[in-house]
Amino acid sequence: MHEFEISCISKPRNGLWHHQITHVGNLNHRWRLPSALIIRRIELNTETYYLLNRVTGRRSNIAVVQEPGQRPYLRAHAGGEWNDDLLSLRRCTARCNLVG
């Protein structure tokens, strides 16, 4: 299974919630993908995604959250607990090519 680091996200300017993330990507490798595609790949167990907290060095894995009556969304977890590390990432820039 392939593994990819996420280092940026795209969401509306006033977006404060995980379900508002539209794309995730990697600034160093200059790519971004729609969240819906990442969700599908995680659910199919073809790829895994993670992020590194640059302050603590802690790795968080990205998982799909499905709440009743809502569409699935991405969220980070580490040590058995959900966290907001995904929301704290920088915004993807125009240099991040849309792929997929």
Image: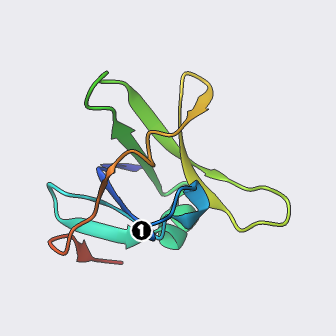
Task: Say left or right for 49 vs 68.
Answer: left
Residue at image location 37% in from the left, 70% down from the top: 33
Residue at image location 78% in from the left, 55% down from the top: 67
Residue at image location 84% in from the left, 66% down from the top: 69
Q: Is residue 71 visible?
A: yes
Q: Quadrant of residue 23?
A: bottom left
Task: Say left or right for 32 vs 30.
Answer: right
Residue at image location 73% in from the left, 56% down from the top: 66
The one nearer the camera, 5 or 3, is: 5
What colour scheme was applied to this rendering of the protein?
rainbow
Q: Quadrant of residue 95?
A: bottom left
Instruction: Give above or below for 45 relative to 22.
Output: above
Instruction: Give above or below for 48 relative to 94.
Output: above
Q: Which residue is mark 1?
A: 13
Residue 50: give x, y in percent of width and height.
40, 43
Q: Quadrant of residue 8?
A: bottom left
Looking at the image, the residue that sits furthest to the right is 68
Residue 22: give x, y in percent of width and height.
47, 70
What amino acid is found at the position of numbered circle 1 in the picture? Arg
Looking at the image, the residue that sits furthest to the front is 14
Q: Secondary structure at mark 1?
A: loop
Q: Is residue 44 visible?
A: no
The one nearer the camera, 36 or 21, is: 21
Count how many numbered circles sit on residues in the image. 1
Residue 20: give x, y in percent of width and height.
55, 65
